[in-house]
Amino acid sequence: MPAFLYAALKSNGVAVKPPAALPARLGVRVSPGDANPFKLPVAIPPEPSGVTVAEITKRITAILQQLNPDLGFRHLRLKEIPFELYEVFLEKALRIGLTVGVGVNYANFLSARRSRDPTLHVFRVISVITNTVTLFDDSGECKPGKVIENWVTIERAALSADDGFWLVGPQCDLLLAQI
């Protein structure tokens, strides 16, 4: 999520210095034994690694208020979109110029392994053309970083993570992105 937010800020003309400080500002915790180049707090089991949606929403809002109060953030789970109009919503959000991420269960998306425990990951959406979505992994964890996939696969991975869209853009545009 921090890499997506950094890219969203950059695309909206906001510089974050240093970008390596963003994961800590967002409250990200790493699992014991994971690589920890940014010296983030370590999650002591049963505490989960990563960060909750509620926590990160508060922190993103605070960061945006500090850096550019005209920008806003919205997290929208797919199950909150009526009549399963997910792709319609996505196309509209991109059309009005929002930076859109999609949260997926990585373990059931691109990874060869299948898992009941979700491995949550946010990809930035570049485009949607006839049920085909181009994503970019700003974190660099996915090789290659650019992923072209059909919408059904992405939808399934987002629903299995109980996730959806991560939206950053001007406050007025976030209001336009209503379904």
Image (tube, rainbow, N blue to C red):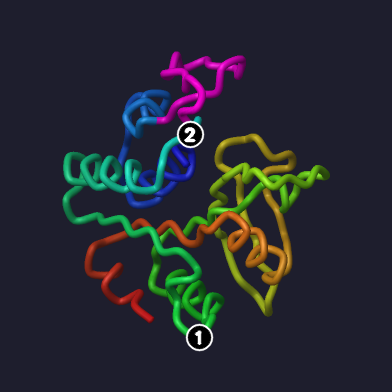
Q: Residue at x 40, y 67 (%)?
A: 97
The answer to which of 15 and 138 lies nearer the viewer is: 138
Q: Which residue is mark 2?
A: 50
Is 34 in front, or is 15?
34
Q: Nearer the viewer, residue 149 or 11?
A: 149
Q: Main secondary structure of the magenta part?
A: loop
Is there CB contact under 8 Å for labels 1 and 2?
no
Question: Residue 68's spot in the image, x, y percent?
Answer: 20, 47
Q: Amino acid at mark 2?
A: Gly
User: From mark 1 to mark 2, how far is it between C-alphas?
Assistant: 31 Å
**Residue picked out by circle 1:** 83
In the displayed structure, 132 sits above or below 134; it is below
Q: Which residues are magenta?
A: 28-47
Residue 162 percent location from the top left of the image: 53, 58
Q: Quadrant of residue 137?
A: top right
Residue at x 73%, y 68% (from the top left corner) = 150
Q: Residue, x 46% and y 64% (percent of image)?
A: 77
Query: At which x and y percent is residue 23?
Result: 41, 29
Magenta-colored stretch includes residue 44:
yes
